[in-house]
Amino acid sequence: MSARRSIADLSADLADRAESFCRQYFPEGRKQGNYWQVGDTSGAKGQSLAIRLQAESGRKAGSWQDFATGQYGDLIDLLHERLGSVTLKETLREARSFLGDAPCPAVSHAARNVERPDAASSKRIARARKLFAAGKPVLGTLAATYLQGRGITRLGPALRYHPQVFLRHGEDDRDPPHRAPALLAKISDNRGQITGCARTYLDPSTGGLAAIESPKRILGQLHGHAIRFWSGTSCSNLIVGEGLENTLSVGTALPEFDLASCLTATHLSLFIPPPGIKRICIARDNDEAGRNASNVLRNQLKSHGIICSELVPAMDDFNDDLRAFGRDALRRSLLKAMKAQGLEIKDG
């Protein structure tokens, strides 16, 4: 599949997979004959919105109408409403991701060597996909408050919010679970397929992290994969970071770059680069774990012929730098470090 397909081509491809589309983005709905019925474009339960699953009587598959509001359109329109996307580019990136058409769709040799998930892992991946699909856009939510409180303005379709995500306080399965609000982040492979969902549990009274043991948890498979944020332009450079906030802080200062967040130092060292990438900047934490992970990844990347450079924060991590010095100062610092390592970026 070409990443340069027209919107009409993307719409037609989504229509060919209309039922799968509905099950992923509108899991609260249900199939009624040739239609998927759901409450509204946000995915709430109900029957007001009907999505045609197969073409019939001259009417196209994927067409939909919300009889409560009068809204209608194709699956690109519906996806735009579902995501609450700020721009059409974000919607089209999500559509390509769903279709398995990530910016670099070819599968690398390293990716082929990733172990296939066993039955238990497959169930966790399925749960992660269902959870992420049940989330809603972060704008105007507690998740946005959390990120903005950390100075982060780089968002995207890989982030969603859910007000009631299951949570256990301890590792003992006998502990009764309850629900708590969480920032959700989509973990995906190099084909754009969802392999997991990162959950950051939040405290609604403070807008910060929930006061629990391990407020950041992962459901599904992360090995070799990442949370991805595309800049909207074709680029052979990629910034790969550790934690989500660390990576998004760099992305806030450098919005023209594609990003991949590996969430932990261990998984940073295991990252599998997408095909087509010529240079990777590793944005690590300023500690021994980050340094060791960066060294391992750099050796791996060099064996693939990828040019490597390293970005190191002045403080513990780049979110500390962003909050202490501000976006503009962080941008100048990052550009200076890149220039010193031979990567010229125009500061417009």
Image (tube, rainbow, N blue to C red):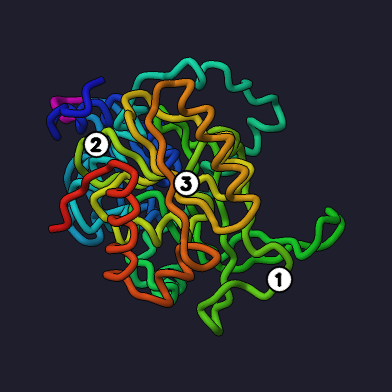
Quadrant of the image containing the C terminus: bottom left
Alpha carbons under labels 3 and 2: distance apart? 21 Å
Q: x, y (%) of residue 184? A: 50, 56
Please state which of residues 285 and 138 is positioned toward the viewer in this rendering: 285
Nearer-N-terminus badge (1/2): 1
Asked if the residue at tag 2 contacts the one at tag 3, i.e. Cβ–Cβ closer than 8 Å, the answer is: no
Residue in view at x 30 percent, y 70 percent: 329
Q: Label 1: few (<14), some or many (≥20) within 10 Å?
A: some
Q: What stretch of residues is rendered in magenta?
A: 56-60
* Residue named by callout 1: 212
Asked if the residue at tag 3 contacts the one at tag 1, i.e. Cβ–Cβ closer than 8 Å, the answer is: no
Q: Is residue 206 visible?
A: yes
Give left or right: position of 296 versus 320.
right
Q: Against 275, is 308 above or below? A: below
Please state which of residues 329 and 10 is positioned toward the viewer in this rendering: 329
Furthest-front residue in view? 340
For badge 2, the amino acid type reads Cys
Q: x, y (%) of residue 289? A: 65, 50
* Residue named by callout 2: 235
Q: Is residue 59 magenta?
A: yes
Nearer-N-terminus badge (3/2): 3
Q: Magenta part mainly helix, strand or loop?
A: loop
Q: Which element is circle 2 on?
A: loop
Residue in view at x 22 percent, y 28 percent: 3
Quadrant of the image containing the N terminus: top left
Q: Is residue 272 magenta?
A: no
Alpha carbons under labels 1 and 3: distance apart? 22 Å
Q: Which element is circle 3 on?
A: strand
Closer to the observer: label 1 or label 2? 2
For badge 1, the amino acid type reads Ile
Give me the disc on residue 186: 3
